[in-house]
Structure formats: structure tokens, C-alpha cells
């Protein structure tokens, strides 16, 4: 199975699909549409209906082609549950050193959320090599540029919250390694064909930045 480093080096778009609210019954169809569109990082937030069932099924079906995991992880127990169903990336909305450190111990790909430089450094100290600016749209690409001036060079910053095809170029130009896209890609009730179309639009927008 590929690591995040290998996946991105292989030319995968630096786009994580955030499937908040997805149900297990639709998870495979939506995941198939996204993978087909070229998006290979898929996150099911833990405040979705039965997230572990969706993640486990998606991992079984697409784990050889995509990095699949969970988001909105708030506890060490949640990290262990994610690992238990084969999830490979853990995303948090906050900076909780104990949660991040447990993910690192289990060998998960880490993408903890931060807003301030202090939170960024706490996440890095706990083991993160990638961190997620959330909520990103409120702060903007100039904020990323300023924070990156003080971060270690090896740390990748991802923007999440209000991101989409219309802004991916701005975030990447501002120094982000990638973006996570939620509502602009999937909302509960959206069918797989619609999500696939949005996924292709996102990938096309990313290719235009190269």
C-alpha cells in the first residue's frame, strides 16, 4: 500500500475528499466515482452515520488504489477504532497531542487540524508531518504563507474549510501541499454521478495549476 508521500510523488492530485454524512449503503458507489475521477485520498468523518462500516468497506474495495480513513477524530479510542477497520489516514479538526501521538504509534498517516502557530508546533511535536489549516477560507492563502515562514520545511500544510475547484490554485500558490474538500464535493443525498462530476472538475482545476 502506498504512503501519502508515494501517492503524491506518483502524481495523484493533492486533494482529500471529505465525505461528511455519507452512509454505508452509498459509500462504495461514491468512493468508486471519486477514485475514477482521480481523487485518491478519501475521508469519512466520524460524525457520519456508522463511519467505521463505510471506512472498512471502502478500504477493502479501494485500499490498493487510494488512502482511506476517518476525520473528526477526537479521542484515542476513535484512532484505535479507525486502525481496527483498516483506515490509514486520520484527520482531526483540532490539535490534541495524545490523539496525534497514538495515530503515529499505529503507523497512520496524520493530518491534524491547527489554526495558530502554537497549535501547528504542538501537532508537529506529537508526530505530525502534515497539518491542516481549519477553517481555511476565513484566514486565506496569505496566512498559510506567513505560518510556513516559521514551520520546518518538511511539514506540509493542507487547507480545509471553504475550499474547492475555484480556489485550489490560490491555496497551492500560497504554499499549501494540498486541500481537503467537503461540501463543494459531497453533501448528504448527492448521488455518485454528481460527486464524480465534481471530482473531475476539481482534478481539472488542479491540473491547470501545474
Image (cartoon, rainbow, N blue to C red):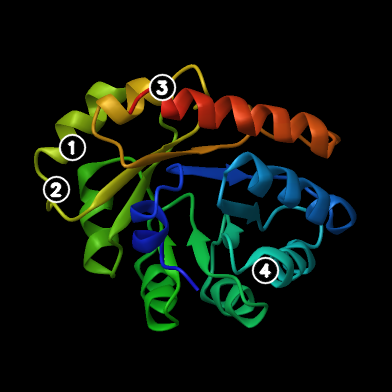
Q: Is the residue under label 2 in contact with that under label 1 (CB below 8 Å)? A: yes
Q: Give coordinates of residue 162: x percent, y percent.
A: 51, 26
Q: Which mark is residue 147?
A: 1
Position of 154 with respect to 28 (left or right) is left
Give me the residue at 43% from left, 52% from top. Answer: 94
Q: Is the residue under label 1 in contact with that under label 3 (CB below 8 Å)? A: no
Counting residues from the start of the chain, the first of labels 3 and 1 encountered is 1
Give me the residue at 61% from left, 44% from top. Answer: 18
Of marks 4 and 3, the one in the foreground = 3
Counting residues from the start of the chain, the first of labels 2 and 4 encountered is 4
Counting residues from the start of the chain, the first of labels 1 and 4 encountered is 4
Q: Which residue is mark 2?
A: 151
Q: Which residue is mark 4?
A: 59
Q: Residues within 10 Å of mark 2 (few under 14, many from 20)?
A: some
Q: Which residue is mark 3?
A: 208
- CA–CA distance in space, label 2 to label 3: 28 Å
Of marks 1 and 4, the one in the foreground = 4
Q: Determine whether 182 is above or below 23 in the image.
A: above
Give me the residue at 44% from left, 29% from top. Answer: 206
Counting residues from the start of the chain, the first of labels 2 and 3 encountered is 2
- CA–CA distance in space, label 4 to label 3: 30 Å
Q: Secondary structure at mark 3?
A: loop
Give me the residue at 60% from left, 60% from top. Answer: 70
Q: Give coordinates of residue 57: x percent, y percent.
A: 77, 68
Amino acid at each position: 500500500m502506498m504512503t501519502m508521500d508515494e501517492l503524491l510523488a506518483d502524481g495523484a492530485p493533492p486533494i482529500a475528499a471529505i465525505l461528511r454524512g455519507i452512509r454505508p449503503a452509498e459509500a462504495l458507489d461514491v468512493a468508486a466515482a471519486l477514485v475514477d475521477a482521480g481523487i485518491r485520498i478519501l475521508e469519512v468523518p466520524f460524525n457520519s452515520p456508522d463511519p467505521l462500516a463505510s471506512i472498512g468497506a471502502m478500504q477493502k474495495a479501494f485500499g490498493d488504489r487510494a488512502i482511506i480513513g476517518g476525520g473528526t477524530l477526537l479521542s484515542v479510542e476513535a484512532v484505535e477504532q479507525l486502525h481496527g477497520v483498516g483506515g490509514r489516514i486520520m484527520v482531526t479538526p483540532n490539535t490534541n497531542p495524545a490523539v496525534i501521538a497514538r495515530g503515529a504509534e499505529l503507523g497512520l498517516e496524520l493530518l491534524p487540524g491547527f489554526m495558530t502557530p502554537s497549535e501547528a508546533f504542538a501537532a508537529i511535536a506529537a508526530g505530525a508531518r502534515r497539518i491542516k489549516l481549519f477553517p481555511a477560507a476565513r484566514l486565506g492563502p496569505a496566512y498559510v504563507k506567513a505560518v510556513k515562514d516559521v514551520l520546518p520545511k518538511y511539514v506540509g500544510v493542507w487547507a480545509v474549510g471553504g475550499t474547492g475547484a475555484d480556489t485550489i490554485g490560490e491555496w497551492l500558490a500560497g504554499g499549501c501541499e494540498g486541500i481537503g474538500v467537503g461540501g463543494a464535493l459531497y453533501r448528504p443525498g448527492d448521488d455518485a454521478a454528481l460527486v464524480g462530476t465534481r471530482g473531475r472538475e476539481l482534478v481539472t482545476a488542479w491540473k491547470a495549476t501545474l
